[in-house]
Image (cartoon, rainbow, N blue to C red):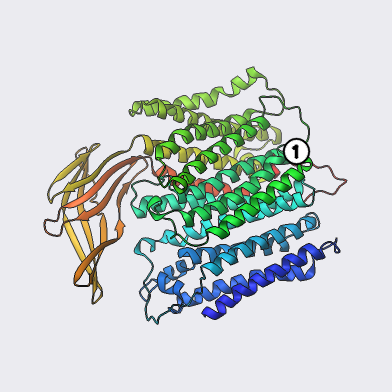
């Protein structure tokens, strides 16, 4: 299997090189269709990478421990579902899966091409194959089909911390989001190469962009949930370099989505669309490099450092230098259409939105790269204190821009329109004050969230009322038909509502959480925190013999919980320890943990079990009360819904040369 798998990757690389040459050289003489041999080559590469993934899956299912990837990430006792997770486990598995999605993306882009975008295909597909070759080179450095150097009848097994349903969704969703950014990048650069930067590439890339944004966003949320619910970090975001590597390209894609709206409506922000498409892909590759270059003591879940640094560095420099040259050389193609918009207009609000997103990304990038340069981790206060005002400004702009048009607004009318959103902001603050949230750094963000949410609902409600009056429909018919006709617009509204809801959970859990860390508690002893009383009732041991020289012990702490004198259900945090007999000594190590969480819409009661004493049964625990955390996950599901609604809108074909070039907001 090792020979066949490696041979497939080598053959895919050879075919990719040939297809690039054929696409670029033959297309000069073939102006009416994509060169046939190159077209076949693109599909062959996709087929070979699919075959490689199938071979890897067969190896996991068949327990072929002659492969190092299978030996390290599975065992005979690994549940069948988690054998599938072995496909993206480890550095080699993740890169193979990524390369597979890139190859499929190139094939699908070519398959769905039409007469409107045929001139983009030679360069776009060639760039996609160039990226594929980059990943194949990485796979030659860390081969997924590497043969084990010794015979093995069983594997080491997937880490217990990874044997969670989230392992089946978080990595592949995030990796697929990373991979799909290659399509907007390739189409933008192809438009530059053709010296024809128009709406064709934007419309061709629209659904790919939405898909990449949605997968990255949802993948990040799944990662937050994993850290909070499974890993027992006590929080969901610690500004870890690997977390930031997923956030930065998502922020740039968010700005790109909004720039595309302005460009397709008004022909403005053309240079933003191109630069953001390039920057988001470049940031994805930089994030992959950070993930593999960051020392383990500076990141909670980085890959082991590898010798891929030179390849990443060369590729990043090639993309940066090549893109910079094309942008400078084709700068005359990036001029936007002239406009006379007022200073206080929606287009300028979108431009300000982009600048704020860009500033936030730069701040995060500096804080992320600092540990690589200095060797010292960056304080979370650096990220929080700078990004919180920026994110609040973005959220406020997303609400207020709904009431702005192209022309100078009537200030009296604008003030009247903002009365209800302002009242919504006040209504959001009043309950917080009643419940004792009186700090200005929470009241101001809550006011912003209330204003934004009310603005979205008011605008949506006015649209429905306008249709009811104009079409003489009842409220249900008007709402549904308006939503169905403008799914992209209202999908965006749903996403904005989701962001507001998630921000509410983040503000509440960040500003008003209570915690008692590293408490040593004896049997029968009680601890109180924020109106909760925790009484420790003892330990339950569950030993498991793994081999003649290794034993696992799972210790489960039993805690009775009361809130203001009212008994709640008991909580049982747990931990698993490995005891290995080596060289006459017993080596102890912790291999898994299970936090105990009692959740409702108002707060989470959170208990982390750190350690225990086998003699006295004393335990070392951390207690936390986290308000409003569940609203983060609710907002994440709503974001997924809104993104899916926007993705369901098909991309419009470019009109003929003689047709009027007009794209409404609902078509974006």
- Residue 610 appears at what percent x and percent y? 25, 53
Image position of 588 with respect to 319: above or below: below
The C terminus - image quarter: top right
At 63% from the left edge and 28% from the top edge, which residue is drawn?
A: 403
At 80% from the left edge and 54% from the top edge, which residue is drawn?
A: 116
Of 290 and 397, the residue lying toward us: 290
Q: In this view, does 586 lie to the left or right of 642?
A: left
Of 569 and 300, the residue lying toward us: 300
Residue bearing the label numbered 1: 267
Q: How crowded is mark 1: few (under 14 residues within 10 Å), some or many (20 or more)?
A: some
Quick one: SS at disc 1?
A: loop
- Residue 136 appears at what percent x and percent y? 59, 67
Q: Is residue 483 visible?
A: no
At 20% from the left edge and 68% from the top edge, which residue is drawn?
A: 586
- Residue 53 appears at what percent x and percent y? 55, 71
Of 276 and 597, the residue lying toward us: 276
- Residue 290 appears at what percent x and percent y? 50, 53
At 35% from the left edge and 74% from the top edge, which residue is drawn?
A: 77
Q: Is residue 73 visible?
A: yes
Q: Is residue 393 left or right of residue 123?
A: left
Q: In this view, does 663 lie to the left or right of 593?
A: right
Q: How many labels does the image show?
A: 1
Residue closest to the far right: 658
Of 543 and 471, the residue lying toward us: 543
Image position of 84 with respect to 574: above or below: below
């Amino acid at each position: 299997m090792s020979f066949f798998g490696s041979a497939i990757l080598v053959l895919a690389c050879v075919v990719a090189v040939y297809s690039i040459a054929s696409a670029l050289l033959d297309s000069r003489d073939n102006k009416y269709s994509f060169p046939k041999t190159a077209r076949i080559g693109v599909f062959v590469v996709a087929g070979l990478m699919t075959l490689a993934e199938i071979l890897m899956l067969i190896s996991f299912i068949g327990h072929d421990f002659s492969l190092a990837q299978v030996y390290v990430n599975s065992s005979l006792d690994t549940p069948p579902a988690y054998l599938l997770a072995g496909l993206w486990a480890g550095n080699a598995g993740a890169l193979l899966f990524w390369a597979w999605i890139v190859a499929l993306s190139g094939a699908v882009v070519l398959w769905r091409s039409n007469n409107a975008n045929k001139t983009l295909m030679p360069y776009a597909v060639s760039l996609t194959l160039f990226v594929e070759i980059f990943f194949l080179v990485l796979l030659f450095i860390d081969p997924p089909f590497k043969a084990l150097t010794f015979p093995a009848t069983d594997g080491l097994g997937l880490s217990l911390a990874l044997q969670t349903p989230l392992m089946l969704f978080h990595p592949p969703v995030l990796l697929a989001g990373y991979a799909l950014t290659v399509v907007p990048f390739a189409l933008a650069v192809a438009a530059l190469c053709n010296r024809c930067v128009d709406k064709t590439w934007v419309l061709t890339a629209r659904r790919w962009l939405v898909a990449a944004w949605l997968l990255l966003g949802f993948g990040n949320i799944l990662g937050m949930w994993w850290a909070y619910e499974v890993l027992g970090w006590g929080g969901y975001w610690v500004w870890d370099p690997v977390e930031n590597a997923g956030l930065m390209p998502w922020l740039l894609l968010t700005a790109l989505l909004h720039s595309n709206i302005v460009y397709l409506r008004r022909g403005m922000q053309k240079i933003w669309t191109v630069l953001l498409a390039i920057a988001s892909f470049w940031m994805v590759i930089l994030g992959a490099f950070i993930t593999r270059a960051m020392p383990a003591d500076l990141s909670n879940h980085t890959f082991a450092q590898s010798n891929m640094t030179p390849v990443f560095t060369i590729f990043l420099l090639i993309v940066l230098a090549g893109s910079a040259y094309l942008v400078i050389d084709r700068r005359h193609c990036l001029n936007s259409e002239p406009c006379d918009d007022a200073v206080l207009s929606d287009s300028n609000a979108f431009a300000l939105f982009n600048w704020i997103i860009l500033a936030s990304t730069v701040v995060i990038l500096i804080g992320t790269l600092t540990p690589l340069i200095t060797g010292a981790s960056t304080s979370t206060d650096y990220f929080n204190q700078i990004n919180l005002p920026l994110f609040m400004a973005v959220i406020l702009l997303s609400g207020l821009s709904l009431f702005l048009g192209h022309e100078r607004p009537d200030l009296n009318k604008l003030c009247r329109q903002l009365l209800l959103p302002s009242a919504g902001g006040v209504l959001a603050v009043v309950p917080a004050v009643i419940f004792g949230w009186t700090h200005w750094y929470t009241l101001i963000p809550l006011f912003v969230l209330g204003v934004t949410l009310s603005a979205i609902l008011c605008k949506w409600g006015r649209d429905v009322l306008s249709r009811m009056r104009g079409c003489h429909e009842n409220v249900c018919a008007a709402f549904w038909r308006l939503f169905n006709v403008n799914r992209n617009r209202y999908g965006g509204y749903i996403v904005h509502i989701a962001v507001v809801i998630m921000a509410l959970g983040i503000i509440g859990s960040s500003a008003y959480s209570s915690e008692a860390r590293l408490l040593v508690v004896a049997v029968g002893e009680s601890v109180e925190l924020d109106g909760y009383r925790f009484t420790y009732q003892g330990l339950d041991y569950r030993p498991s013999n793994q081999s003649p020289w290794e034993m696992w012990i799972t210790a489960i702490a039993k805690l009775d919980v009361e809130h203001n004198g009212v008994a709640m259900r008991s909580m049982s945090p747990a931990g698993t320890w490995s005891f290995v007999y080596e060289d006459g000594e017993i080596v102890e190590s912790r291999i898994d943990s299970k936090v105990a969480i009692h959740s409702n819409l108002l707060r989470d009661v959170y208990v982390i079990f750190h350690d225990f004493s086998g003699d006295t049964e004393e335990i070392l625990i951390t207690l936390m009360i986290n308000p409003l955390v569940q609203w983060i996950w609710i907002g994440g599901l709503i974001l997924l819904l809104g993104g899916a609604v926007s993705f369901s809108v098909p991309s419009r074909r470019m009109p003929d040369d003689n047709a009027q070039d007009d794209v409404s907001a609902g078509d974006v």
